[in-house]
Image (cartoon, grey):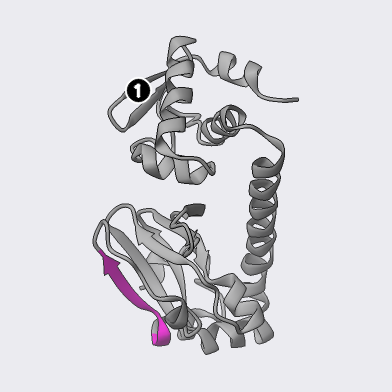
Amino acid sequence: MLQVLPLDIEQSTLHQDIEKYGKVVLFSKGEFLFTPEKMCEKFFFVLDGRIKVSQVNLQNGKEQTLRILTYGDMCDVISLLDNKIHDKLLYALDEVKIIVFPMEVVKRWMVENPDFNKLLFPYIAKVFRNMEELALDLSFYDTHTRLLKLISKNINHESKNKLNLIHDLSHEEIASLIGTVRKVLNRHLQMLKHDGIIDVNHKNIELLNTQKLLDQLPL
């Protein structure tokens, strides 16, 4: 099991706990993962696939995607820190593999194990920065700019035409990432296509002109 955890723990005191408590769990594409109540009891690392983390307004049914988890990501650091239910939905965008630990074991690592904290604390900072950026984007930028920023953050630097986490997502999923609806998103995708920045083929978005995209981003 050690080789599947995204940690360098060969010489770590985590070794025995990972072997003892870690459990690999698989989810099918389209399947919801643990409920918020269950996530107060469990903590996991993503080993393969993408997981959408979102919240839904029960009054109007509007969904806001908070982030997409992928290899090496952890969940749920908020419940780990405050011992409270974190009201969110976890949805498998692909076939997903995770490694799950009891929350009380991870809390003990946080108190006793500096090897774990070297990984945890920078990760928590990254999560908070991402949430702050999302809040600012929704407050300060229009839909077109938010779409440009989303595409720019997912540029694959090895294959520049292909995007990373969003390359095959439905337009509904992409709209939820930037706080809009499919109809509005489609209009802005067509604008970028008309400008020669992207090509759109069903769910696939291909980046055609990276420099043009970057030139349109706010300074």
Dot 1 crowding, Cα within 10 Å, few <14, some 14–19, many 20+:
some
Front residue of this view, candidates 106 and 131: 131
Give the answer, above or below, for where 163 lies relative to 80. above
Taking the spot 44% from the left edge, 54% from the top edge, the residue there is 70
Name the residue tied to disc 1: 200
Query: Which residues fall within the magenta stretch?
Result: 20-27
Is residue 154 visible in the rendered image? The answer is yes
Outermost residue on the left side: it is 28
Taking the spot 50% from the left edge, 29% from the top edge, the residue there is 157
Q: Is residue 218 left or right of residue 49?
A: right
Q: Position of residue 10 (x, y in %)?
A: 50, 71
Which image quadrant: the N terminus? Answer: bottom left
Front residue of this view, candidates 193 and 70: 193
Taking the spot 51% from the left edge, 36% from the top edge, the residue there is 154
Outermost residue on the front side: it is 59
Q: Position of residue 198 (x, y in %)?
A: 43, 19
Is residue 165 visible in the rendered image? The answer is no
Residue 26 magenta-drawn? Answer: yes
